[in-house]
Image: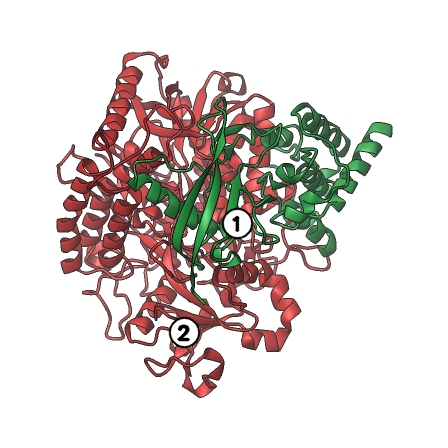
Amino acid sequence: MTNSIDINLEIWRQKDSRAAGEFEVYTLQDISTDMSFLEMLDVLNEKLTREGKEPVAFDHDCREGICGMCGAVVNGIAHGPEPETTLCQLHMRHFKSGDTIVIEPFRSRAFPIVKDLITDRSALDRIIQAGGFVSINTGGTPDANAIPIPSATAELSMDAAACIGCGACVASCPNGAAMLFTGAKISQLCLLPQGQKERKERALSMISTMDSEGFGNCTNERECEAVCPKGISISNIARMNREFVKASLF
Amino acid sequence: MELNSHVPEGPLAEKWDKHRFSAKLVNPANRRKHKVIVVGTGLAGASASATLAEQGYEVSTFCIQDSPRRAHSIAAQGGINAAKNYQNDGDSIWRLFYDTIKGGDFRSREANVYRLAQVSNNIIDQCVAQGVPFAREYGGTLANRSFGGAQVSRTFYARGQTGQQLLLGAYSALSRQIKAKKVTMHTRQEMMELVLVDGKARGIITRDIISGKLESHSADAVILATGGYGNAYFLSTNAMASNVTAAWRAHKMGAGFANPCFVQIHPTCIPVHGDYQSKLTLMSESLRNDGRVWVPKKPGDTRNPASIPEEDRDYYLENKYPSFGNLVPRDVASRNAKEQCDAGKGVGSTHLAVYLDFAEAIRRDGEATILKKYGNLFQMYEKITDSNPLHEPMMIYPAVHYTMGGLWVDYNLMTTIPGLFSIGECNFSDHGANRLGASALMQGLADGYFIVGTSIANYLGSTALETVNNNQAEFSQSEHNVQERLQKLLRSSEGGPEGKFTVDEIHKELGLLLWDHCGMARNKEGLEKALLELPAIQDKFWNHLYIPGTGEELNQSLERAGRLADFLEFAEIMIHDALDREESCGCHLREESQTEENEAKRNDAQYSYVSVWEHQGEGEQPKLHKEMLTFADVTPSQRSYK
């Protein structure tokens, strides 16, 4: 059922990475509950533009929950209140008229704020560059069916591979850890036969890059799993820790 | 403009081999002396960057997102085709080639399409070796499913996230080369201009999206992998930042633009529901494996779908096309949905939707099986519409999805500008007038992993190139022009927003004009009307646009305005192209050209060509060139999916 609601917004505004930021308050009327959260921000930005004010900068691209570009902390929860939902897939039907919605960027030591809700998450790319791949060149690979993989193994690997790299896990972790992100990539590859050759180096290199980029450590808060839009399980962190211990000792 | 396709001589099946043998090479030790620029990091751009770096070239790669992993290839859901014939159901390279060229309604080049089918199998091998977790059978072999326009099961998939997994595979290969310092990755950089030196592509001007600073980058060759132009319509399934700018800038520097009117309208998307809508969401075509498309038989039947009995339902695709049923190609499915809605049988509050019903499949296979196949799609649908497809049929409607048109390229994927290559959706080469499902991923990776490397070696090995650096006159002049263009965009914003329009307001106006007159069905009168109405929108844009902020900072309104400026110019050749092509073919239905049964009527005698448009200067009519299509190995037939 389509309804309209009136909402109050408190949004973090910060001119650039060096400026001090602050919350600004806005109100929006007649917001259709069929609208997505980002469409609501579009409406706000159109309004601000027409008033000669600066619109709120936020990252977004595919708007179908897969590119991992969007994300903000909504009322204290990364990507907002709906489980397994990116911000672009959150709809206004989950809010009530009169609600105050507080919107902040994904804050973490390793994610400097660029402007308003935009942060710099390039540290995640550097973790992948440290070893989140199988070292093969293009061409000369064996026939795809020459590497049989049990369906259950492929599915388990796929569960981990579903990570969209949005950084919500980092933003929600009290320690600013990227262990769900890193654990997911290490798991995807260590579960598959293709990932065996570099299994040790991968775990050691990705984990040391994770540390040097300023991410924290896991203390089993499980906040990352709770906000992950793709439902990635913290069992991937446990697997990563086992990989690390094995790679360090044997 | 000279159009030489450089298709090698000899039998179709031997052309690619022969070409690879006759193509020039660059000695491994010399490759590091050559710098190649790649713009875009989707399947084509990421795979090309990684492959060229592995071969030893020095690669500079650019993307507008914060990470190369976010390119819109990531959103492809259903799968990737290959002629593996793992299902032993009669598939072959020849059949994949034939299906693709027939699916494209015989408006693509035989040699390119055949090569695509040939390398399709290598792609699957490559991706599996990278650790892409494709779906498997219980015995451990790869699983397949069917897609529209084919009667074999040749589509490989990773749940409903195939594009994501393939892109992450290419991104991981790219990441490895970034670590090896063979690729210099530039994120949040937008290409603003192509730079030519001595008539050859030698670099680009980019804008740093965060600081607004312009940068010059020089190279020996430039590869554009910047995707399609579906966002000209404002509403499409493309990502918000997808745009035509890189391709359009190249066009204005002399690259021919081919078949701009060929725009695929995808049949299974979530219908539009409000004027605030920012994009449309695709529901994978794979759903048509199990979903049945229907509308009420009686126009204006507003009963709840569950209370409409079987005898009052029209499963129009199954009835009209018994041999392909719900799996007819996309253009046919889209047109039929429009036809049903035009006849007043559309469903939902806007009456611009048809049902896609899983009730029978759920009865047959059980909820668990259906959820295993489509769970994430059902979930996405429910999030957006608040309706659960397990209990109610989905409502779907066609939406702009993919653009078959693009920069004209020869067999080497080189544009009409020497040294400028175009790969993936950005070129026109393989899909003719209609792309079959699961073929975009195939083409992007074929171009990037297996084809463009040969082309780059051939070009660099056979071309004498002067040393160029990025502070010479051509670059500073080009930077200056970009700066002026940005200033021009901001000019009308002085004095505040009163009486002015926002970027999105004007973009929506352009989108509506194109959707109404250059959308699913086109006619001369409508297209001429669109050409007459376009200048008023362009005038509004250049004289009454309001952009807050400046060019020397992160300014998302200015970014969008720059892209819209190019869409507004591009729209013109799109309409001209649709006007010129007085036949129906593939996605392009000219209402004047239909059979008695209202099916699209192709006209091979007059229109068996690729339209290639040449820029003639500001305000001048673009010039049409024709690459005649010849078919030596297949006989163009009227497509029939009955």
Q: Quadrant of residue B62?
A: top left
Q: Secondary structure at mark 2?
A: helix
Q: What is the x, y in percent for residue B563?
A: 31, 37
The N terminus of chain A, quarter of image: bottom left
In the image: residue B354, left or right of residue A96: left
Residue identifier under label 1: A65
Q: Colour of chain B?
A: red
Give me the chain letter of mark 1.
Answer: A
Query: Chain A takes which shade in the image?
Result: green
Is B326 on the left-hand or right-hand side of B247?
right
Asked if residue B111 shows in the view, the reply is: no
Q: Position of residue B487 (x, y in %)?
A: 25, 26
Instruction: Establish if B624 lies above or below A1.
Output: above
- Whether residue B8 appears in this view of the structure is yes
Q: Which element is circle 1 on?
A: loop
Per the image, the residue denoted by label 2 is B317
Three-letter residue code for mark 1: Gly
